[in-house]
Amino acid sequence: QAADALKSIARRQDLKAQVERTPALNGLLRRAAARYVAGDSREDGIEAGRRLLGQEYAISLEYIGENTQDAEACEAAAEELAALVGELWRLGMAARVSFDLSHIGLAADDELAVAQLLGLARRARGTGIELFVSMEESAKTDRILAVYKRAAAEEPGIGITLQAYLNRTPGDLAGLEGIGGPVRIVKGAYREPEEAAIGRSEALNERYLSLVEAALAQGRRVSVATHDETLIEAVAARGWIGQGLEFELLYGIRPDLAGRLKAIGYPVRVYITYGDEWYLYLCHRIAEFPPNLYRAIADIAGG
Ligand code: FDA
């Protein structure tokens, strides 16, 4: 319930405006967000990416945003992503660019989302920059998959994120047979109806592993996107590393674990975010793992 409350706080535009109008509060929360968000600007994201590439991590970059309803704002978000792709290419940086479809059109209209996704894919074609669709609440899963399938039929390199906690996901993965590119498997970050999903448990980890196995069997590259060490060890024990599998962790979360996995020689990608919606992202990370609230207070006090 606390997690739900935080997520609704994140989406309250009046609170966000209040934070923006109150420089002292804004400054304090920014200090806490700095652990998870590279900065406000594209340059900040690219700079963090350059640093991590220098340390031999692969990188993903996300321009933070979701549920954008206004068509002009969707257009602006897609333009920012296209500029990001162009800049990464100009700098010769290998990267993955991730985004919510609801940031670039899905919240307004499915056709807009398809057009934006295809436009971005054409921009990314031949650059070596990989586009990756994030997965949102289950109320949107059908539409996200439908938009993805239409775009991937024309631009097969686009990747998609699948959530192991949803009971429907094994079927969704089977339904992608022969379509599209790499997959990222995550546990899932939203509060879902009881009949739709399972909670954090051994059963969830078992399902996670069977999804990884099924995706590899489809010949896909797979990102195991988790900070769960037990799950990571189970993946490693199955001997799947070296078959197009990598680990992917969020920037600022368990950097010790990312470093250890890299030192063993496993491929590790770090998922970096940037943008002025850092407040939304901070609330999401605290909701996902409430002890982060204490960390945030310590970051504020110590900064
Ligand atoms: P779990 O929640 O079981 O946590 C295991 C351990 O990891 C915890 O005990 C703690 O030690 C550590 N940990 C986890 N979260 C932490 C946090 N926020 N702060 C500090 N420590 C933490 N979700 C989604 O629904 N759609 C999506 O598109 C994506 N995309 C995505 C990309 C990438 C690269 C990652 C890593 C994650 C996502 N997620 C996501 C989020 C994902 O669904 C999930 O909520 C988080 O990864 C947390 O779950 P874990 O798998 O880490 O395990």
Image (spheres, rainbow, N blue to C red):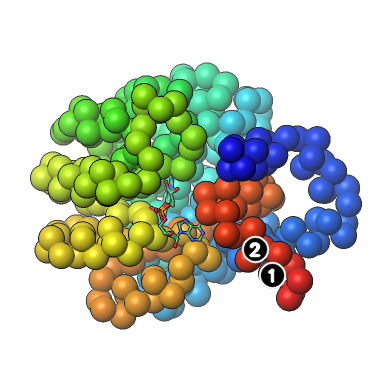
* Mark identifier at residue 294: 2
Residue that mark 1 sits on: 298
Mark 2–mark 1 Cα distance, whole angstroms, equals 6 Å
Q: Give the crowd class for mark 1: few <14, some 14-19, many >=20 residues within 10 Å.
A: few
Which quarter of the figure has residue 147?
A: top left
x and y percentages locating residue 112 in the rendered image: 50, 23
Amino acid identity at mark 2: Tyr
Residue at coordinates 50% horizontally, 74% vertically from top-left? Answer: 51
State whether residue 31 is above or below residue 162.
below
Query: Does 55 sit left or right of 68 as displayed?
Result: left
Amino acid identity at mark 1: Ala
* Picture quarter with the N terminus: top right
State whether residue 264 is above or below residue 213.
below
* Front-lying residue, 194 or 81: 194
Say whether residue 103 is visible. yes
Residue at coordinates 21% horizontally, 60% vertically from top-left? Answer: 234
Disc 2 + disc 1, Cβ < 8 Å: yes
Residue at coordinates 44% horizontally, 50% vertically from top-left? Answer: 97
